[in-house]
């Protein structure tokens, strides 16, 4: 589980933005929404939602998590010594656009706490640090100042220490990434957790639809996904995956070069490739009796159905494995009731027995009045007049300003909590343009 994440000087975040997923000591209700970690005396939230105006920085906050994850996993394998690091600092200030960007994450994995972070520019890793807390005491595993490595723990980070001694770490690669590539046990443990920390877009479901299709191809996975679809009242009774298993299944008119590529893929993928997917719906006569099955191409389904199907795989995998799922624009194309039900899945101990975590942003204000969320689960992203984004929680307000019985939805729309667009001059600004 993610305990805390912070980012500084990345895209619209000029100053440090810190997200804490620790439960507030002021909120005593909805105990099912949090997980107790007794060995560290922590209470961690199972979900968190971010609100804000368009262009406030909500998606960029999700991007920051995605960038950190990807750079850790791939900085050693995907880059050469002269390659630029694909970092984008805050560009609306002459100081920050030439300063390093900073990321840090604290997470719980296998009953132990880890704190890892780094600062980077496009040219190099400026600093990097890793701390480990197996019990009560936090242990420093290493600290890096450019190419100077200090306090590298020779026992707990054995292979990493050897790589440092042998000068095997490039200036544009993270030590943690290089250590994992050389099978350092501790680095591999962190990589194992990162594989369970998934950041996806709610606007581009094609990026994870293939993952869901892969689960459908397994009978057990298919049954769970069908239950998930049926619960949403989409009218889908079954789904059918179409396979192309031999050259004769390919259209005769297909260009020869494309056909050769697909044949090669068949050889590489257990003798088949996917040829599409169909959804099955019951047919009924005038008396309401079932009289057959109608097949539809997935593209014939509504955009909301297509997204919900694509999301089903990552959501179910996250719940079954106790992972963390970060979704940008969760509500896009989905009915508000469906969004609320997805959040409920993560709050309930029945559907979330392994303490999975959901972090997302949305414009769906219905959640604010749903009674599903505590104050400490509701976050806002706001941009100032200088183009810099900041984040704050509803729990950050004084208790006499925000009470748990307040109408959060009404107050948010009325601007009481900020993080809404300023629209008072909206009509006046457009009047001249349309006349």
Image: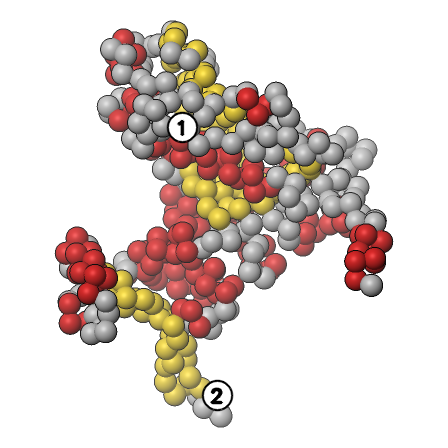
**Going 51% across and 52% down the picture, which residue do you hit?**
202
Q: Secondary structure at mark 1?
A: loop
Q: Nearer the viewer, residue 53 or 34?
A: 53
Of the numbered discs 1 and 2, the one sitting upstream in the chain is 1
**211 left or right of 286?**
left
Residue 196 appears anywhere in the view: yes
The residue under label 1 is 84
Q: Is residue 324 above or below residue 24?
A: below
Q: Nearer the viewer, residue 195 or 118?
A: 118
The residue under label 2 is 288
Q: Nearer the viewer, residue 435 or 208?
A: 435
Q: Quadrant of residue 334?
A: bottom right
Q: Position of residue 111 (x, y in %)?
A: 40, 27
Q: Position of residue 167 (x, y in %)?
A: 28, 12
Q: Quadrant of residue 180?
A: top left
**Going 51% across and 38% down the picture, which residue do you hit?**
63
Q: Nearer the viewer, residue 156 or 72?
A: 72
In front: label 1 or label 2: 1
The residue carrying pointer 2 sits among few (fewer than 14), some (14 to 19) or many (20 or more) residues within 10 Å by Cα, namely: few
Q: Secondary structure at mark 2?
A: loop
**168 left or right of 403?**
left
Residue 116 appears anywhere in the view: no
**319 left or right of 410?**
left
Q: Are marks 1 and 2 in contact (CB under 8 Å)?
A: no
Q: Separation of disc 1 and disc 2 at Cα?
A: 64 Å
């Amino acid at each position: 589980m993610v305990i805390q994440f912070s980012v500084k000087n990345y895209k619209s975040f000029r100053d440090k933005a810190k997200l804490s997923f620790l439960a507030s000591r002021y909120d005593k209700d909805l105990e099912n929404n949090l997980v107790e970690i007794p060995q560290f005396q922590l209470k961690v939230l199972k979900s968190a939602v971010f609100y804000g105006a368009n262009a406030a920085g909500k998606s960029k906050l999700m991007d920051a998590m995605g960038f950190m994850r990807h750079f850790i996993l791939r900085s050693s394998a995907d880059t050469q010594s002269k390659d630029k690091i694909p970092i984008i600092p805050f560009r609306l200030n002459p100081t920050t656009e030439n300063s390093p960007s900073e990321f840090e994450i604290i997470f719980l994995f296998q009953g132990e706490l880890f704190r890892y972070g780094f600062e980077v520019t496009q040219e190099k890793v400026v600093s990097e640090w890793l701390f480990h807390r197996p019990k009560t005491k936090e242990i420093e595993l290493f600290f890096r100042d450019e190419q100077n490595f200090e306090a590298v723990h020779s026992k707990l980070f054995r292979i990493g220490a050897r790589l440092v001694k042998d000068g095997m770490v490039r200036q544009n690669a993270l030590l943690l990434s290089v250590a994992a590539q050389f099978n350092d046990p501790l680095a591999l443990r962190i990589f194992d957790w990162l594989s369970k920390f998934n950041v996806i877009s709610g606007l581009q479901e094609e990026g994870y639809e293939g993952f869901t299709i892969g689960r459908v191809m397994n009978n057990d996975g298919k049954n769970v996904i069908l239950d998930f679809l049926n619960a949403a009242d989409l009218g889908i009774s079954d789904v059918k995956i179409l396979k192309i298993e031999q050259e004769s299944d390919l259209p005769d008119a297909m260009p020869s070069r494309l056909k050769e590529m697909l044949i090669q893929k068949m050889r590489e993928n257990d003798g088949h490739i996917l040829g599409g997917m169909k959804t099955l719906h019951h047919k009924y006569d005038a008396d309401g009796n079932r009289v057959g099955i109608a097949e539809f191409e997935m593209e014939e389904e509504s955009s909301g159905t297509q997204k919900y199907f694509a999301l089903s795989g990552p959501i179910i995998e996250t719940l079954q494995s106790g992972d963390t799922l970060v979704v940008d624009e969760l509500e896009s194309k989905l009915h508000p009731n469906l969004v609320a039900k997805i959040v409920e899945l993560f709050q309930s101990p029945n559907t979330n027995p392994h303490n999975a975590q959901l972090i997302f942003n949305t414009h769906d204000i219905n959640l604010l009045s749903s009674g599903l969320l505590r104050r400490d689960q509701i976050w806002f992203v706001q941009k100032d007049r200088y183009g810099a984004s900041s984040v704050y929680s509803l729990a950050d307000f004084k208790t006499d300003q925000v009470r748990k019985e307040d109408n959060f939805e009404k107050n948010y729309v009325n601007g009481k909590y900020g993080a809404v667009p300023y629209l008072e001059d909206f009509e006046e600004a457009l009047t001249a343009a349309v006349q």
